[in-house]
Image (cartoon, rainbow, N blue to C red):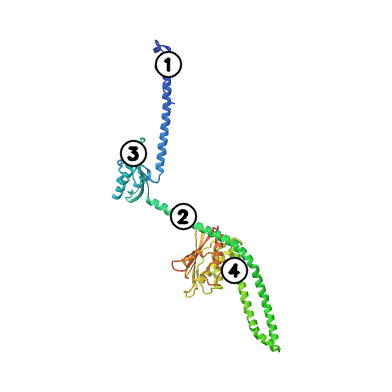
């Protein structure tokens, strides 16, 4: 509270003589009231000054934090207030910008015309949005999307304009980042849907494989028994036919084509057996597809897995397939060696099939291994015809294949995709600019301390 003198201090005791006591008491009482009111008013004034300082500091912090440029000008277009964003853009201090015409910051006559038109609309209490070209501190032209609004005083009278805007370069960068984020979100959604589809399909085919396994076992078992029976029947008929049979029996033998029937039995048995085995292979593929997560998880060195896959494919179905591969630095992943070998063999075999198409040049495959601090990537690039654009999105779908009937089940890439996903990695495909297809897989790498 202010330290004000008491009103009684102005009236020494000697000066009160000759005046009624009641009168002086009233005067003193009134002066005490005035004194108390004066103290109260001074306290309120100090509080209002403190509030005003807080408000000014708050407004200043807002203006300083704004990334958009701000200009407050009077009716004549002279700058009265601005913020740090504009000062940084034009390379001038706030003090030097005050009383500067806005047109002095503009880069060309077209911007001056747009500014004058915006001032006209603001004079009619309208909000105008205009693109102005400013000159930055390097002398470069910077397009800024400005919003021009009228500014009023406490009496409601228009006293100037307020311009707020952001350089279009920042807006374009923000839009580009938003578009990238949107594309990443769409890709993540597609991967999520695909993973959910694969999981649902895995549960379905597990039941189908179980149901098919029993009848296939019956067929295989019965065919093997029939082969033994056919052998015995053939020996018996040969013995019977060596006998001197009646003419009626000989005629019936010819009519029923018994010799032709007995001669066809072995090929029919072999065909049935081959079909049953192929069906069993399909069922086994379905079981692997639905149970790809099973298996022991260990530390697996990928170079060794790739070399083993190359060895088995070249020793088996593709002895003349030329594969370019160089053993890289040892890199380990956490996974199942058998499942990863299955993936590598499938990718190499598919590349051999694609590159060995009729009329194609000598089939070749380039396998490249790369690694960074967190992941290892393997790229399988063949010199085949590539993948048709309409097939790229379906390559990993179960039962989808472009091979001839009987040449593929369409499960290999689906199983491989599921195995890599379960190992925490990704498997993708694309067409190379040099021709041919490129399959790329990425797996999280283990950083083993030596």
Lower sequence index among marks 4 and 1: 1
Quick one: label 3, few (<14), some, or many (20+) residues within 10 Å? some
- SS of the residue under disc 1: helix
Whole-Å distance between the Cαs marked 1 and 3?
Answer: 52 Å
Q: Does 372 appear above or below 43?
A: below
Residue 108 showing in the rendered view? no
**Viewer-closest of 49 and 220:** 220
Within the image, what quadrant is residue 32 found in?
Answer: top left
Whole-Å distance between the Cαs marked 4 and 2?
Answer: 40 Å
Expressed as whole percent of the image width and height from the top left, the position of residue 217 reads 65, 70
The disc at residue 26 is: 1
Lower sequence index among marks 3 and 2: 3
The disc at residue 182 is: 2
Tell us which disc is closer to us: 4 or 3.
3
Expressed as whole percent of the image width and height from the top left, the position of residue 73 reads 33, 41
Q: Does 269 appear above or below 31?
A: below
Lower sequence index among marks 1 and 3: 1
Q: Which residue is mark 3?
A: 158
């Amino acid at each position: 509270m202010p330290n004000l003198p008491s009103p009684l201090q102005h009236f020494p005791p000697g000066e009160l003589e000759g005046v009624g006591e009641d009168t002086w008491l009233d005067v003193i009482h009134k002066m005490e009231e005035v004194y108390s009111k004066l103290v109260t008013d001074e306290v309120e004034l100090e509080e209002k000054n403190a509030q005003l300082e807080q408000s000014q500091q708050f407004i200043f912090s807002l203006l300083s934090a704004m990334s958009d440029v701000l200009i407050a000008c009077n009716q004549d277009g002279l700058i009265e207030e601005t913020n740090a964003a504009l000062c940084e853009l034009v390379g001038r201090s706030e003090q030097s910008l005050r009383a500067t015409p806005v047109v002095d910051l503009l880069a060309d006559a077209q911007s001056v015309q747009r500014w004058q038109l915006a001032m006209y609309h603001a004079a009619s209490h309208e909000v105008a949005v205009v693109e102005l070209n400013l000159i930055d501190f390097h002398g470069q032209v910077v397009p800024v999307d400005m919003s021009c609004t009228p500014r009023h005083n406490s009496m409601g009278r228009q006293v100037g304009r307020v311009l707020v805007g952001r350089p279009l370069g920042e807006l374009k960068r923000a839009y580009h980042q938003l578009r990238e984020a949107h594309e990443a979100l769409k890709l993540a959604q597609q991967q999520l849907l695909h993973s959910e589809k694969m999981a649902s399909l895995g549960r379905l085919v597990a039941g189908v494989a179980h149901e098919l396994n029993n009848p296939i076992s019956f067929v295989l078992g019965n065919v093997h028994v029939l082969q033994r029976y056919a052998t015995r029947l053939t020996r018996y008929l040969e013995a019977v036919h060596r006998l001197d049979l009646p003419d009626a029996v000989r005629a019936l033998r010819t009519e029923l084509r018994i010799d032709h029937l007995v001669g066809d039995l072995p090929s029919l048995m072999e065909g049935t057996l081959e079909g049953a085995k192929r069906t069993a292979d399909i069922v086994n593929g379905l079981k692997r597809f639905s149970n790809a997560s099973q298996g022991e998880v260990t530390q697996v060195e990928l170079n060794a897995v790739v070399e083993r896959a190359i060895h088995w494919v070249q020793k088996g179905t593709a002895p003349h397939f030329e594969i370019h591969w160089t053993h890289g630095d040892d890199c380990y992943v956490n996974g199942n060696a058998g499942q990863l070998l299955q993936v590598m063999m499938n990718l190499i075999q598919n590349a051999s099939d694609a590159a060995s198409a009729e009329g194609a040049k000598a089939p070749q495959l380039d396998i490249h291994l790369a690694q960074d601090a967190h992941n290892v990537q393997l790229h399988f690039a063949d010199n085949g015809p590539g993948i048709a654009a309409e097939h790229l999105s379906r390559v990993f779908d179960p039962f989808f294949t472009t091979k001839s009937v009987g040449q593929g089940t369409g499960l290999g890439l689906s199983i491989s995709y599921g195995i890599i996903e379960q190992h925490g990695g990704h498997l993708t495909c694309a067409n190379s600019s040099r021709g041919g297809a490129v399959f790329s897989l990425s797996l999280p790498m283990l950083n083993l301390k030596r």
